[in-house]
Image: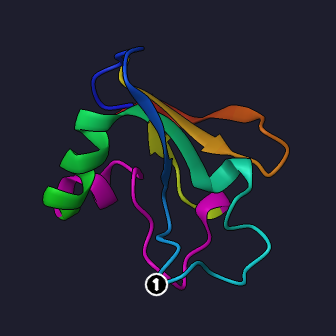
Amino acid sequence: MRCGSLHRLTIHHRVNRGMGGAREPWINQAQNLLLVCTTCNGWFEDNPKPSYEAGWKVRRPQLPDEVEVQYADGRVYRLTPDGVRTTAAGATR
């Protein structure tokens, strides 16, 4: 997401699952998931401020479909539960 790599990919939860997982039905739906390289996944945890600013991480009580996310190409999208991403207003940050 941050770098655009297609190697060593993993699923990143924008809203953390918490200890032992969460009960929210949306926690494993598309709007809360990003496919990222393992390096970026660790970077998100080590750099929370820019991660929240770019929408790679989302703070509770916000819902992930309410928070735009920036992709590696600079485009900004809103993600939906059915896996659709729509271009957000002001397409770049």
Three-letter amino acid code of the residue under disc 1:
Met
In magenta segment, residue 52:
yes
In magenta segment, residue 90:
no
| Magenta stretch in the rendered image | 49-65
**Vertical relation: 81 (above or below) 4:** below
Residue 5: x, y in percent? 34, 16
How did the renderer colour the structure? rainbow
The residue nearer to you, when weighing 74 against 32, is 32
Residue displayed at 26% across by 52% down: 44
- Quadrant where the N terminus sits is top left
**Residue 58 in sight here:** yes
Residue displayed at 40% across by 50% down: 56
The residue nearer to you, when weighing 58 against 10, is 10
Residue 34: x, y in percent? 53, 41
Residue 80: x, y in percent? 76, 48
The residue nearer to you, when weighing 52 against 18, is 18
Toward the right, the furthest residue is: 82
For residue 56, side relative to residue 29 (left or right) = left
Residue displayed at 69% across by 34% down: 85
Which residue is disc 1 drawn over? Answer: 19
- Which image quarter: residue 88? top right
**Vertical relation: 26 (above or below) 11:** below
Q: Secondary structure at mark 1?
A: loop
- Which image quarter: residue 74? top left
Residue 49: x, y in percent? 19, 62
Residue displayed at 50% across by 68% down: 15
